[in-house]
Image (cartoon, rainbow, N blue to C red):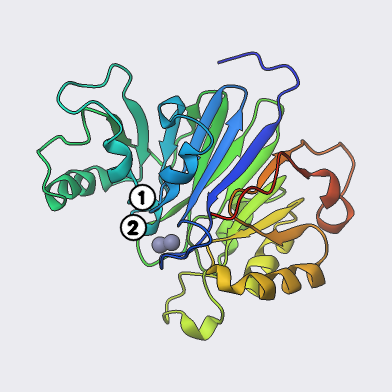
């Protein structure tokens, strides 16, 4: 734990596309920083390459993975190759996996034709208990279950100053997700669907309108739409503009600082503009 005077919670979008590769941005990957805590949420394909533009991935404090779909964890394979080959790394990277995922990671080392324990020399890969709190550096994490085709968890991250950033992970419409992210200072909310008609009968993703409705009902101070095909950017910008300034679509490399709420102020429209501020640049289109 570090004393970080003047620190702010900081989010950088390393990847905000859905599963199909797109030249504009990798699949899911979000860097959350406080002081010298560097937490990576999800590591979909292409995310490590974007992380390397910011700093050496060995400086990560930990990775947390919400569910075991390829667009949320597959770049663990690439990341592994940055670590020593034979001997165990002196400082293995903590990788927090959802329940049941440890065996999948072991199967992945077989699937990519690597030796048993391929990941073990580099990572401390352990399953988290979604019912328990998890401390990563200075950040405190709580998990909640999403509504998805496979077991999937979202997370609420609390900084030492009380700022809360929430990430839905992959989910369909869900009142329990809404409750879990209630009054977050910044919500990353997925919108993988153009239309609800594109979803399975049992829902597992959100449309833009559903994502905004969830964020609004949850009374979050600000929201960022994530996990969408970037071809939809203009459409989502228009949807967000109509909803008000408190929500907008993510773009590759976007960096925001998130401030704690001032006591006594409202949520959504009334207060959005002071919840987040663009830090650094809106980065390079990759
Ligand atoms: Zn998924
Ligand atoms: Zn996904």
The percent position of residue 82, horizontal first and vertical second, equals 30, 33
Residue drawn where x is 43% and y is 44% of the image? 49
Disc 1 under 8 Å from ligand 2? The reply is no
Residue drawn where x is 46% and y is 79% of the image? 199
Which quarter holds ligand 1? Answer: bottom left
Task: Name the quadrant of the N terminus.
Answer: top right
Residue 69 appearing in the image: no
Q: Determine crowd level at label 2: few under 14, some 14-19, many 20+ residues with C-alpha closer than 10 A.
A: some
Q: Quadrant of residue 259?
A: top right
Q: Where is mark 2, residue-wise? A: 70
Cβ atoms at labels 1 and 2 below 8 Å apart: yes
Which secondary structure, mark 2? helix
Disc 2 under 8 Å from ligand 2? The reply is no
Q: Where is mark 1, residue-wise? A: 73
Q: Nearer the viewer, residue 39 or 15?
A: 15
Q: Determine crowd level at label 1: few under 14, some 14-19, many 20+ residues with C-alpha closer than 10 A.
A: many
Question: In this picture, is 246 found above or below 229?
Answer: above
The percent position of residue 45, horizontal first and vertical second, equals 38, 54
């Amino acid at each position: 734990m570090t004393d970080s005077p003047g620190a702010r919670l900081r989010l950088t979008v390393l990847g905000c596309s859905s599963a199909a590769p797109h030249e504009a941005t990798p699949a899911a990957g979000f860097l959350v920083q406080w002081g010298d805590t560097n937490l990576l949420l999800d590591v979909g394909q292409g995310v490590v390459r974007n992380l390397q533009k910011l700093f050496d991935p060995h400086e990560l404090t930990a990775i947390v993975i919400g569910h075991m779909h390829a667009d949320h964890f597959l770049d663990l394979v690439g990341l592994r190759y940055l670590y020593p080959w034979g001997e165990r790394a002196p400082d293995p990277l903590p990788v927090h996996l959802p329940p049941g995922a440890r065996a999948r990671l072991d199967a992945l080392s077989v699937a990519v034709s690597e030796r048993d324990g391929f990941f073990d020399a580099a990572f401390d890969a352990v399953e988290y208990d979604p019912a328990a709190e998890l401390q990563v550096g200075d950040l405190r994490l709580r998990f909640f279950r999403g509504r998805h085709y496979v077991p999937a968890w979202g997370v609420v991250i609390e900084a030492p100053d009380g700022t809360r950033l929430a990430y839905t992970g992959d989910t369909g419409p869900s009142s329990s997700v809404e409750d879990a992210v209630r009054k977050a200072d910044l919500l990353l909310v997925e919108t993988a669907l153009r239309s609800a008609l594109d979803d399975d009968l049992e829902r597992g993703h959100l449309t833009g309108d559903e994502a905004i409705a969830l964020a609004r009902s949850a009374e979050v101070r600000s929201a960022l739409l994530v996990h969408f095909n970037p071809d939809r950017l203009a459409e989502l910008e228009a949807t967000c503009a109509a909803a008000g300034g408190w929500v907008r679509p993510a773009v590759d490399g976007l960096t925001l600082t998130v401030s704690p709420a001032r006591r006594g102020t409202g949520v959504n429209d009334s207060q959005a503009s002071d919840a987040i501020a663009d830090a650094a640049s809106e980065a390079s289109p990759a």
